[in-house]
Amino acid sequence: MERIGYTSQARDLDAVFAALADPTRRAILSRLAAGGASVNEIGVPFEISQPAISRHLKVLEQAGLIERDVDKQRRPARLKAEPMAAAVRWLEEFRQFWSTSFDQLDGLLEELKKAGTKRGRK
């Protein structure tokens, strides 16, 4: 039996969404959007250890959301946004569904208002 929607692209999206599920990793990505940084620089606003920051960076790297360079003793990380663009494209597929659903809900609420107004006049 073929599993619908289960492709290598779906597995890549799984890794992206799993990485984005953690608030610390999202904060790290926000920091890296301003430019590359070392583990120590990334860890400044967090009350967690450097090894914990490194583990978060490893998850982000495995998801393809960051790249790590080697610069002498430093291993600066920088944002790699292409995988997030793929996640956005996937989410955009549902925009039409939600837009239609909200339009239908608006129509229903308008009908209920009109029906309530008519009952109030009688």
Image (cartoon, grey):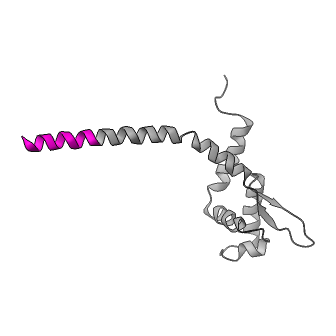
Quadrant assignment, res 47? bottom right
Q: How many marks?
A: 0
Front residue of 32/61: it is 32
Please tell me which residue lies in front, 89 or 37.
89
On whether residue 111 falls in the magenta region, the answer is yes
Give the percent coordinates (x, y) of residue 17. Answer: 64, 50
Residue at 71% x, 41% y: name it. 11
Residue placed most toward the observer, 44 or 97: 97
List the single residue furthest toward the left. 122
Residue at 77 percent of width and 66 percent of height? 54
Q: Is residue 104 above or below residue 21?
A: above
Hey, which quadrant is residue 81 in on the image?
Answer: bottom right
Q: Is residue 13 magenta?
A: no
The residue shown at (93%, 72%) is 72
Range covered by the magenta-colored residues = 110-122
Q: Is residue 17 left or right of residue 110?
A: right
